[in-house]
Amino acid sequence: MSRYNNTRILINSSEYYAPLRKSRKMPAIRQYATPILTNPTVEQRSRLKTTAYIWKYGDRFYNLAHKFYNDTRFWWVIAWYNSYPTEAHIETGKVIYIPLNLEQALRVLGM
């Protein structure tokens, strides 16, 4: 399941993109609307089963997504749940929490 499954598709025919459209011989460009993700409430967090993970030097969200979800595409679920936009924002030794039930975490997100 992609984070864009339920996202509106926008047709962009703005003059700003005219050179790009012309070079690609396209009348308009299809773009995804930015998804609005919500932060889980305390109650929602209490219902999600998580595991604690101590961040190590060299860790990457996509590697953790592969390890826990068997799919690197869901790296953003771990980042979102812990409120870290990138790995550069996490200090070595910091404890992060990984939602174990991916489907349930995606429901909390509104996906």
Image: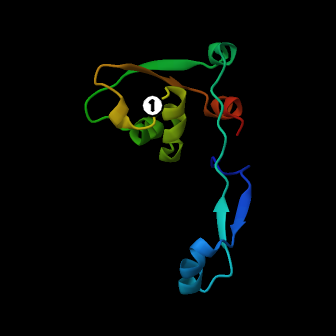
Q: Residue at x 65, y 71 (%)?
A: 14
Q: In this orientation, which residue lies closer to the viewer: 8 or 63?
A: 8
| Crowd around label 1: few <14 · some 14–19 · many ≥20 (10 Å) | some
The mark tally for this picture is: 1
Question: Which amino acid type is shown beneath numbered disc 1?
Answer: Tyr
Residue 88, quarter of the rendered image:
top left
- Per the image, the residue denoted by label 1 is 84
Judged left or right of residue 105, residue 52 is left
Q: Residue 36, how many percent across, how many down?
A: 67, 40
Q: Which colour scheme is used?
A: rainbow
Q: Residue 21, how many percent across, how many down?
A: 59, 80
Residue 85, quarter of the rendered image:
top left
17 versus 100 height, above or below: below
Q: Residue 84, how many percent across, how many down?
A: 45, 31
Q: Residue at x 62, y 27 (%)?
A: 39
Judged left or right of residue 19, residue 37 is right
Secondary structure type for disc 1: loop
Residue found at the very far left of the displayed protein: 57
18 versus 91 height, above or below: below
Judged left or right of residue 90, residue 15 is right
Q: Which residue is drawn at 48% across and 33% down?
A: 79
Q: In this orientation, which residue lies closer to the viewer: 69 or 89?
A: 89
Check the picture and name the quadrant holding the C terminus. top right
Q: Residue at x 64, y 30 (%)?
A: 105
Judged left or right of residue 111, residue 62 is left
3 versus 16 height, above or below: above
Q: Residue 38, how many percent across, how many down?
A: 66, 31
